[in-house]
Amino acid sequence: MFVISLYNLKGGVGKTTSCVNFAYMASKDGYKTLLWDIDPQGASSFYFKAVPIIKGSSKKIIEKTIAIKSAIVPTNYTGLDIIPADISARKLDILLEENSGAQKQLKSILKDLSSIYDFIFIDCPPGVSTVANNIFYVSDAVLMPVVPTMLSKRTYDQIKAYFIDKEIELGKLMCFFSMVEIRKKMHNDIMHLLYQEKNFFEHYIPYLSDIEKMGIKNAPVEVFAPLSFACQSYRALWNNIKEGILD
Ligand SMILES: Nc1ncnc2c1ncn2[C@@H]1O[C@H](COP(=O)(O)OP(=O)(O)OP(=O)(O)O)[C@@H](O)[C@H]1O
Ligand SMILES: [Mg+2]
């Protein structure tokens, strides 16, 4: 089982959109896949039209008053399940802060799923929080979408410094460019600069209206636009990521 969290300190950079598409693509590749939506905004859950079956499930999973398995619901797609977000996820920070063994606890919660799933994707809320810190430890890969602007470069530097400071394995931090407008000189310049860092994937996700349409179609892009450039971009990047993590 491989745990991939979609994370960035910055909001609105494409974490949820890519989490939904990669999780779908992993399941299409034949991997048994789970998406755990821990962002109380519940955007991943919205794309899959999924609602929680247990009230306060996020809190109860962390407190271990319910088994994580009992919060899982199937999506409309074979091999792809989801733990939908619920409003109690907004309290995860406090719950994890109060619990000194939180990292181990989270790891043992996820371990219960290792005989069932090949991939677990975690859609994280933005910010540097206790949640993020714990997620870094339990993830095999922290996948970070980066919009190529000067401020994002600064954010990337901050996160990298955080990993070094907390002695989290830097190899886990895997980045890709998101919402790229290739005709913009600034996007090109920042990409050129950041490609010198070892942890950026070569393939990137352009800014495309087909990706925005996911909100209208309530589905991953491969479902409603399988031949689109948007879908090809996600496929190429997903193959890039698989090579990177499964090697
Ligand atoms: N490559 C893209 N091209 C066009 N629109 C995009 C692209 N990626 C994301 N979007 C749009 O940008 C908005 C933000 O994307 P998304 O919700 O994936 O970001 P996020 O990082 O998860 O945000 P948050 O921090 O709020 O969780 C959405 O409306 C989405 O449809
Ligand atoms: Mg999101």
Image (cartoon, helix red, strand yellow):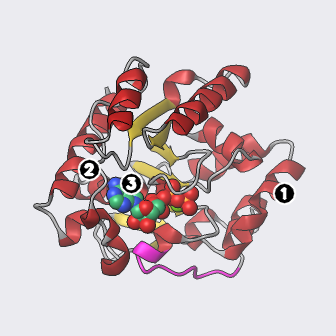
Q: Where is residue 112 in the image (x, y as percent from the top left)?
A: 57, 53
Residue at screen point 64% across, 68% down: 40
Q: Is residue 76 left or right of residue 138?
A: left
The circle on residue 94 is: 1
Q: Which amino acid does label 1 sit on?
A: Ile
Q: Which of marks 3 and 1 is in front?
A: 3
Q: What residue is pinned by disc 3? A: 18
Quadrant of residue 85 in the image? bottom right
Given residues 200 and 96, the one toward you in this image is 200
Closer-to-camera residue (174/60):
174
Q: Within 10 angstroms of label 1, few (less than 14), some, or many (20 or more) residues? A: few
In primary-sequence order, the first of circles 3 and 1 is 3
Q: Is mark 3 within 8 Å of ligand 1?
A: yes
Q: What residue type is labelled 2?
A: Tyr
Q: Classify 197 as above or below 132.
A: above
In magenta, the rendered stretch is 46-55
Q: What secondary structure is the magenta-colored segment mainly?
A: loop
Identify the secondary structure beneath mark 2.
Answer: helix
> Which residue ends up furthest to the right in the rendered image?
98
Image point 47% across, 44% down: which residue?
4
Residue assigned mark 2 = 234
Quadrant containing the N terminus is top left
Q: Is mark 3 on a helix, strand or loop?
A: helix
